[in-house]
Image (cartoon, rainbow, N blue to C red):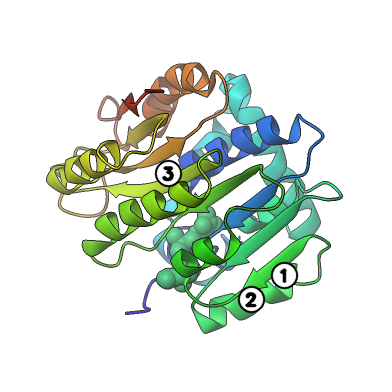
Amino acid sequence: TMNYRHAFHAGNVGDVLKHAVLSLILTHLMAKPKPVLVLDTHAGAGAYDLDGGAAARTGEWRGGIGRLRGAGAAVPAALRGYLTAVADIAAAHGPTIYPGSPLLAAARLRPGDRLVAVERHPETHAALAALLGRRPGVTVRDGDGYAALAALLPPPERRGLVLMDPPFEDRGEYAALAAALGRAHRRFATGVYMLWYPVKDPGAVEAFRQQIADSGVRRVLAAELTVRPTTTIRGLAGSGLILVNPPYRLDETLRALLPWLADTLAETPGVGGWRLDWLRGEA
Ligand code: SAM
């Protein structure tokens, strides 16, 4: 099916976790002068109007980026790069615009860096191409993001971040995502990978984490943030990130940041949760 529209979820708690960590990883990669490839396999539309249409209808962003904006001076230093990027994009594109991952990445490209953003849904692809298609260093592709991994890895730059953020329209996506990571990692073992996954059914999440732990991929960190109990029937409890070859000390940064996010973004006081685990170490 092709029913998923990210606009309903733009700026929500899942986007905040994903985009905050994306921002930290990009900062680390861009700290060295060598060129970088960013490959966004499930890119979405690139920009969302929080005050119109789908995003306004669900209002999910109010519990995510809306809460963070309300936190003011209490916001930890680790979030400032992300929040500055979001504010800069709003200043450039409109005060109610929230960025998707490809726009956040495009904003950080230096001369010589590349972003390849893949989006399969025709209308979403057209919107993304209109937004980013003419920017230097950016390529917007259509078709299947998992198939693009084989076409583009390993990159000639030998340095890069692969973001895999599929829509999870069916349960089989966990297994497909873990398998795609294994295949991509065999082509490009030194790359940084970031995978987003929903936390809803605990059994499905544990099976996914175990599949990745058993896949032969090394240096795998998993970070989860939940804002309501997993027993809640409506909606997600939260989401997680699989981080392969994460930047030096990102684990320490997240260990300090996740408790603050769980407190600040909890749907009601005290129900927020988090965990941070190395699924596989160096060996
Ligand atoms: N990464 C985006 C962000 O953070 O702003 C959000 C992406 S959204 C969760 C998933 C996107 O994947 C949707 O826009 C959907 O149309 C697209 N999609 C679904 N199946 C795909 C596939 N096989 N290959 C590429 N894109 C796909």
Secondary structure type for disc 2: helix
Mark 3 or mark 2: which comes first in sequence? 3
Place of residue 87 in the rendered image (x, y in percent of width and height, measured from the top left): 71, 44
Find residue 178 and name its label.
none
Judged left or right of residue 60, residue 99 is right
The amino acid on which the numbered mark 1 sits, given as a three-letter code, is Leu
Report the residue at 41% width, 23% height from top: 282
Q: Are marks 1 and 2 in contact (CB under 8 Å)?
A: yes
Pick whichever, 6 or 152, lies toward us. 152
The amino acid on which the numbered mark 2 sits, given as a three-letter code, is Ala
Report the residue at 74% width, 55% height from top: 114
Residue 161 visible: yes
Other residues around mark 1 within 10 Å, as few (<14) / some (14–19) / many (≥20): some
Q: Please give the residue where the numbered disc 3 appears in the rendered image.
A: 13
Pick whichever, 122 or 189, lies toward us. 189
For the residues marked 3 and 1, what is the alpha-carbon distance in whole angstroms?
24 Å
